[in-house]
Amino acid sequence: MRKVGTKLFLAMLLVVFLTSTALAGEVNLSIAASLKEVINELAENFAKQNADVKFLKNYGGSGALAKQVENGAPADIFISANFEWMEYLQNRKLMHSASIGIFTYNTLVFVGMADKKVSGLQDLPKLEKIAIGSPKSVPAGEYAMEALKKAGLEKQLEQKLVMAKDVRECLMYAERGEVDGAFVYKTDAMQAKQAKIFFTVPEDFYPRVTYPMGLTLMGVKNKDAEAFCRYLQSGDAKAVLDKYGFAQK
């Protein structure tokens, strides 16, 4: 009986060891969709210097990501496209407040296919379909709605708006010609293969597009997540952000 007990104990230790080994070096990222190329490149660069680190990346609308974290989805680092969803998790005691800082900034633009003649917000009523991120969960959509309200166009356009799950879906609709135009970030427009920028939304029509980032309560216990969070504030990270058109100030 004693030998059986010893073998069982050793087997259990082995299982625990293998489980902890499998999880060691994993960093779960919940990131606003508009940062996909930036984070992919920075994660790849970091992994080259830290071969034992594996990144599990989840991109999407900031609101959807925040709700997932609230519901228990694994996340070590959260980067939102506005303060609202970062504060949402802070208020629920799910973020490590001392780690929160600003990652970068962006600009809102309107894109579409070249055959349309659109030069400003005043031209939008003549369009049939306009893609916008769902304002309830997508910061780009919330910024766009603020701009439409400021321009006095909210009521005129409400039946023409096509809601998208995130800013990349807005761009996809525009690229496919499924809508006449779409509100996206400048950095998303730079990734477009066919759509072009019609105009930049006046910056005094909406709050500045700001990306706060921070460690979750789960992430602050993960040394690799802490190291990557520091890396996101490094000169290397700033160079990659510049490359993709993000603003630093």
Image: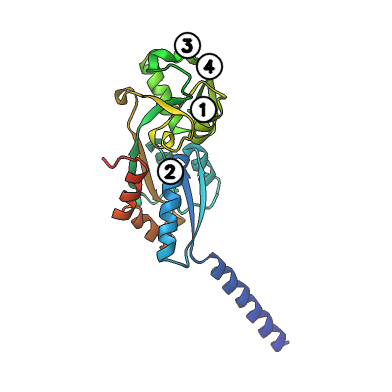
Tell me, yes or no, whether the two marked residues, 1 and 3, touch with CB atoms within 8 Å: no
Camera-nearest label, 4 or 1: 1
In the picture, the disc for residue 214 is none
Q: Residue at x 39, y 58 (%)?
A: 228
Local SS, label 4: loop
Q: Quadrant of residue 144?
A: top left
Spatial CA distance of label 1 from label 3 is 16 Å
Distance CA(mark 4)–CA(mark 1): 14 Å
User: How would you rate the neighbour count of disc 3 (Cα within 10 Å): few for under 14, some for 14-19, many for 20 or more?
Assistant: few
Residue at point 44% right, 46% down?
A: 37
* N-term mark: 4 or 3: 3
Of the pair 31 and 239, the residue shown nearer to us: 239
Asked which secondary structure carries label 3, the reply is helix
Residue position for label 2: 35
Q: Which residue is mark 4?
A: 160
Q: Which of the pair 145/110 is nearer the observer?
A: 110
| Kind of residue at badge 2 | Leu
On the image, the x and y values in percent for residue 84 come to 40, 36
Q: CA distance from mark 4 to mark 2?
A: 27 Å
Rounded to the nearest whole Å, what is the CA distance between mark 4 and mark 3?
10 Å
Residue 206 to residue 37: above or below: above
Residue topped by disc 1? 174
Crowd tier of the residue under label 4, counting other residues whose Cα lies within 10 Å: few below 14, some 14–19, many 20 or above: some
